[in-house]
Structure formats: C-alpha cells, structure tokens
Amino acid sequence: MLDLSENIKRVKERINKALERSGRSGDKVTLIAVTKYVSPHIIKEAANLGLRHFGENKVQEAIPKMEELPEGLYWHFIGHLQSNKVKYVLPRFYMIHSLDRFSLAKEINKRAQQKGEAVKALVQVNVAEEKSKYGLSLKETGVFIEEVTQKYPYIKIEGLMTMAPYVENPEEVRSVFRRLKDLSLSIKVGGVELKELSMGMTNDFEVAVEEGATMVRIGTAIFGDTD
Ligand SMILES: *Cc1c(COP(=O)(O)O)cnc(C)c1O
C-alpha cells in the first residue's frame, strides 16, 4: 500500500540529515515530487500533504493532469524539451530544467517575449558525458550561458541541472555532483547567479544534497514504483 504521508516524511528527514552531515543545516532544499506516471488524484493527495513543487517530463502527459489540479502549485519541466512544444510549456510551468541547446533557447526567448515575461531556466549539463543523456558538456556550459544571456533577455538562467548515471552505490557518482557545483562557482557571467543546483533523484539524492543540491527531483521514493 502507498503511504504517501510516510514516504514524504521520510524523504524530508533524509534530506535534513544530509544537510546536517554536510554542514548545510541552515540551507533549504526544494523537494520536487516527480509525477510522471502518477495520476491526478494521487498528486492532489501529495499537494494536500503540503508538497508544492512537482516535476513532469512530457508536456502532452502533464497538461491534462495539471488541468485537474488546483492553482498555486509550482510545475517544473524536467524532461527533454522539443522546440515545437515550448509554446505549451511556457504558460504552465514555473521553471524549465532542461535548457541544453541554442535552438531551444531561441524558441523559449521568442515565446517568452510574446508573453512579456522572462522564463526561469536551468542549464542541463551532462557531467558524465553519457551518450544516452542530454545536456551540455562541462566545457561548453560557460560559453553557452554567456551567449544565451547576451542574446536572449527573456531567459533567466538561475542554475544548473544534471542527471547522474545510475549506479548501485551512489557514492560512485558523488564526483558528478561535486563537478556540477564547482562548475556553478567557476562560471562568471554578468547578471547571472547560478544559485540553483537541481541534482539528486531517488537513488542518489542524499549524496547530491551533501554536495550542494538546492533542488532534488524525486519520484519513486515518494510514489513508489509506478511504471
Ligand atoms: C523520473 C525522473 C526523476 C525521478 O526519478 P526517481 O528515480 O523516480 O526519483 C528525476 N529527474 C528526471 C529528469 C526524471 O526524468
């Protein structure tokens, strides 16, 4: 049986313990509940239990669910984003975590300008350079942020996002998180503060928090194995 309340409580405790262990007790981590494969009535229950941030990775699947849910929730777009879907994402999502190429930046900027409001985005970095994952390399990221900031005023880059390789023992991917944090500190672009680090999923979020995550994206530990 799914015990949402217990699952959420336990995830929050684990986040807090990881913050304490790493001397970040005063810091806040945004818990993004990833709701792909989760039905609206369960999401509603999670919202009633106090969760406010939710993550979806497919626009077409997210929209009908979002329409059944109350206002006042923050939706994060965490999946690969095709340029022709930007127009559906923009009015509904609070933040895009998967900005990974100029053509996408151009489209986001264009749509945001039409709306007259800048869009919050994180730049996705493929730290481990896995073939199966999207994202810029560590090397490309600084120049990318500089150029996007210069050319696309309707995109507000607030930080970086990564997905670590799946491993049995999350200690093996500690260096992935550390390199993302180091990268965020090393990039100096006027007007940009890379304050958000979206990193850590069910399998590795405690290590990610220890290495400086400010947002974790968690599905399975909250909703169980739903696929
Ligand atoms: C599915 C997904 C998650 C959550 O994964 P879990 O292992 O279920 O916690 C996080 N981030 C992204 C980008 C995802 O697609």
Image (cartoon, rainbow, N blue to C red):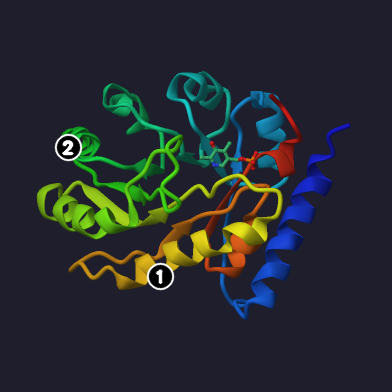
Q: Report crowding for label 2: few under 14, some 14 to 19, many 20 or more residues within 10 A (C-alpha).
A: some
Image position of 132 with respect to 178: above or below: above
Tell which circle, 2 or 1, labels the residue nearer the N-terminal end. Answer: 2
Image position of 190 with respect to 72: above or below: below
Specify the amino acid type for callout 1: Asp
Labels 2 & 1 near each other (Cβ < 8 A)? no
Residue 102 in which image quadrant: top left
Toward the viewer: 212 or 54? 212
Residue 225 in which image quadrant: top right
Q: Report crowding for label 1: few under 14, some 14 to 19, many 20 or more residues within 10 A (C-alpha).
A: few
Q: Secondary structure at mark 1?
A: helix
> Residue beneath label 1, please?
182
Q: Quadrant of ligand 1?
A: top right
Q: CA distance from mark 2 to mark 1?
A: 27 Å
Percent x, y of residue 26: 59, 77
> Residue beneath label 2, please?
106
Percent x, y of residue 27: 56, 72
